[in-house]
Amino acid sequence: MSQVGIVAYGTTPFTKDDHKIESILHKSSNDLFQKNPNIDKKEIDAVLVSTNNNSKYLSPILSEMAGIQPKIAHSIESLCNSGTNSIVSAFSYISSGLADMVLVSGAERYDSPGQILEWDNSRGEFKHPIFWASIFSKSYKEKYSISDEELAIVSVKNHKQASKNPNALSKKTYTVEDVMNSKKLTDDLKLLDCSRPCTGSASILLASEEIMKKYTDSPIWITGIGQKTTSAGFTKNTSLSSMESTKIAGQSALNMANRNISEIDVAEVHDAFSVCEPMILESLGFTDPGNGINMIKNLHQTNNFKINPRGGLIGCGHPLGATGISQTIEIVQQLQNNAASRQTDNPKTGLIHNMSAAATSSTVLVLEK
Amino acid sequence: MSFEKELEKGRFYIPECLACKKLVWPPSEFCDNCNEKTSLRKEEFEGKIIEFSKQNEDYFCVVEFGGSIRIMAKMMTLPKKDQIVKISKCGISERSYYFQII
């Protein structure tokens, strides 16, 4: 199987602005081509668009706007992990030989219809994600004797890290007291525990080993991929304090990369709500069950940006279709030692975790220099 | 689907596979185990509270029925984990199901 690498990337700032989905898709891909003027668009075999937006035929539209005539052009939707699932599709096209170079562009508007899974009637009238997040928080706190103040550290850390990211939605830093005093959404969730929907786009260009050699001397390779769907409905989760799909996807990705979790130097994980970050770290095996908050506290106190250097979803905002691509771009920048004031200490191996609908599905990627 | 017709009348009947007798959820015409047809089991199920939280004055709970089927339901009084409950009110409003337990 041919190796697949990442040639280039582009992004827009994440904002609350009212832009057309077509415009922001074009903006992030244009950023990619402006930063990499040597890329020959004729070599792009496929254009994949990641979004939950209801607009149609977005991939051919983006192709036309960007001056590309690909063989393959279509959209991919899988709620919040549409972005990494699109990257996996691009990887598959390249490794199968159907394509040599694939542009993946993800975008979402602040009013995305992907924020609520209308189909999931098992949730009754409690369909908004704050309700599953509250149930996870209650269950996790009770099982491991974690306080609200301890969970608030996730938000404090990720807002601090986002303040170093010029494209992040949040520009502010917060204290534990700020999080505790933010608007109470439920007994187990405050406003600052939540990621926020926003408008944003991110684009990434993947290529075969052969093409990579033409364009870059410092390639970043996708060496591991793991995906798992356990259900679509929140109430089918057997555990409310760990994430089964994340455990399985994480192990699959590490197996494919022939790596252990201890070899991961930097990671972007899907902190849709504060409680998600410790649950994910534990489910991926970064730390033991119940110890995720201690790991996060330690990282925060030592100003170590190993987990969510971009600022996570809580700090960056969460434009669903763009999130997984933006997470991947961050890990590429980290591995290229190109992450400015967010840079971690010379990482060699990075991981991306992106999930949907209360962790009913997860996608994990491993990237290496 | 007949499940929804009954739900609209305030009756919570769970589909059961005619062949393997598995309770099927989410409600479906076909069994997700053996693919045979289902029909509604017309009995009042007892549920067990698995987890809960609270928004304003209302509690919202994850409730398990028949040992495997879980839904989210509203409760007006303080729930307890493992508390045995039953559906007191259910229906469909604006295309969404709603459930209340006592």
Image: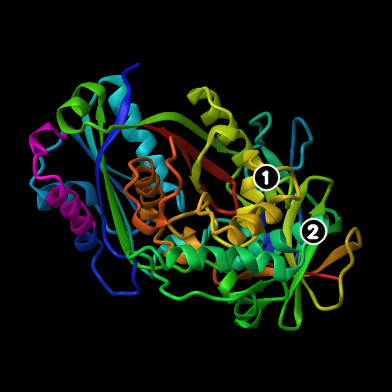
Residue type at numbered disc 1: Glu
Q: Which residue is drawn at 73% across and 50% down?
A: A291
**Residue in front for this viewpoint, A56 or B50:** B50
Q: What is the crowding at mark 2: few (fewer than 14 residues within 10 Å), some, or many (at least 20)?
A: many
Image quadrant assignment for residue A342 = bottom left
Residue type at numbered disc 2: Val
A68 inside magenta stretch: no
Q: Which residue is drawn at 15% across and 28% down?
A: A214
For label 2, the SS is strand
The image's colour scheme reads rainbow
User: Does the magenta stretch mainly form a helix, a strand or a loop?
Assistant: helix
Task: Report the side of B51 relative to A343 (left or right).
Answer: right
Place of residue A156 in the rendered image (x, y in percent of width and height, measured from the top left) = 57, 69
Q: Residue at x 14, y 48 (%)?
A: A33
**Residue in front for this viewpoint, A23 or A205:** A205
Place of residue A189 in the rendered image (x, y in percent of width and height, measured from the top left) = 66, 71
A43 inside magenta stretch: yes
For label 1, the SS is helix
Q: Mark 2 points at which residue?
A: B63
Chain holding disc 1: A
Place of residue A93 in the rendered image (x, y in percent of width and height, measured from the top left) = 30, 28
Magenta stretch?
A25-44
Residue A282, which numbered label? Answer: 1
